[in-house]
Structures are given as C-alpha cells and as structure tokens.
Image (cartoon, rainbow, N blue to C red):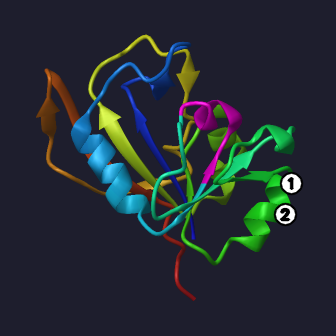
Amino acid sequence: MIRLIAAIDSRRGLATDTGIPWHLSGDVAYFRRCTEGGVLLMGRATYDEFAAPLEGRTSFVLTRDPASVGRGFVPVTDLAGFLDAHRREDLWVIGGAMLYGLTINRGEALLLTQVGGDFGCTKFFPPYEESFRLDHHSEDHEEGGVTYRFETWLPPRRPGP
C-alpha cells in the first residue's frame, strides 16, 4: 500500500527554504508510530535533513546521483519501477513537495497532520481534496501555541456492482 504522510499548514505549506517552520513532538511521535517497520521513500531535499536512516525502517532516496547517497540509505533512480516493485509493501512517501506531486496519483491513503495557521511556507503539498475524501480525524492537539490534528484521507468510494 502506498501512503503519503505529511504535516501541512492551512495553505498546504510543507516547509520554507530553511526547513519545517514548526516543531511538534506529538507529530514526530505520530510519524514514527505510523511508519515503524515500513519502507520510506523520500526525495533528495528530505534526505538532506536526515543524519542517519530511521531505525526499524528501510529508507530509499529518489536521486539522480546514486553515489551521493549515504550509508544505510538506498538510492532509487526509476520512480515508476520502484513504485511497481514495492506496491504490495507498507510504503510511506515522506516528502518533499516534488515527490508528493509525483506520487499522489498512486497514493492509497494520505495521512496528514493539519497544522493550524499560515507559516509562510514556500514548498507545498499538492492539491488533494478533489481526489480523496476525509475518512477520519483526531481531536485537536495543542503544543507551544500551535494547534494541529491528524487526518486520514482515502480515495473516493466506488459504487458497488
């Protein structure tokens, strides 16, 4: 199953040019809990934010330069082939904006942390509201003056036979 997981602000913002503009320990714990034991796929900019692969996960990096990917990460140069080969696994697309745009049409679920407010982001999650339906969401959480909630979006239900 291909899932996209992201935290976005009220304008679908993911990050600024200097990184994610919020730090929510509850969201970090949620991300770790959801992706534990899964396969992670990230783009180059997201990879650059990691000092080491996350424990208990296999970490793949979409890149044009496989030799530049560090130990513990696995380079991917053919996105379509990779997605086809891993479609039956617990695959998590974890960013960034370009990779979300390339994979959202293959996503079987979106796990979004909706962060209240506009954080002046320059990188954005692709539009999704017309291609997915909100399945459920958590109660609101508050941390450091920032309100957020966890949402799960699924493809629209198809009419039965």
Q: What residue would you read off at disc 2?
A: 81
Q: Does 6 appear in magenta?
A: no
Tell me if 33 is positioned left or right of 1 in this view: left
Give above or below for 29 relative to 121: below
Q: Quadrant of the N terminus?
A: bottom right
Q: Amino acid at mark 2?
A: Gly
User: Is any atom of residue 135 visible in this view?
Assistant: no
Residue shown at the point (36%, 54%) measured from the top left: 32
In front of the other: 35 or 114:
35
x%, y% of residue 74?
72, 55
Tell me if 160 is positioned left or right of 33 in this view: right
Q: Residue furthest bottom?
A: 161
Q: What residue would you read off at disc 1?
A: 78
Q: Magenta segment range?
A: 41-49
Residue shown at the point (52%, 84%) measured from the top left: 160
Give above or below for 92 relative to 143: below
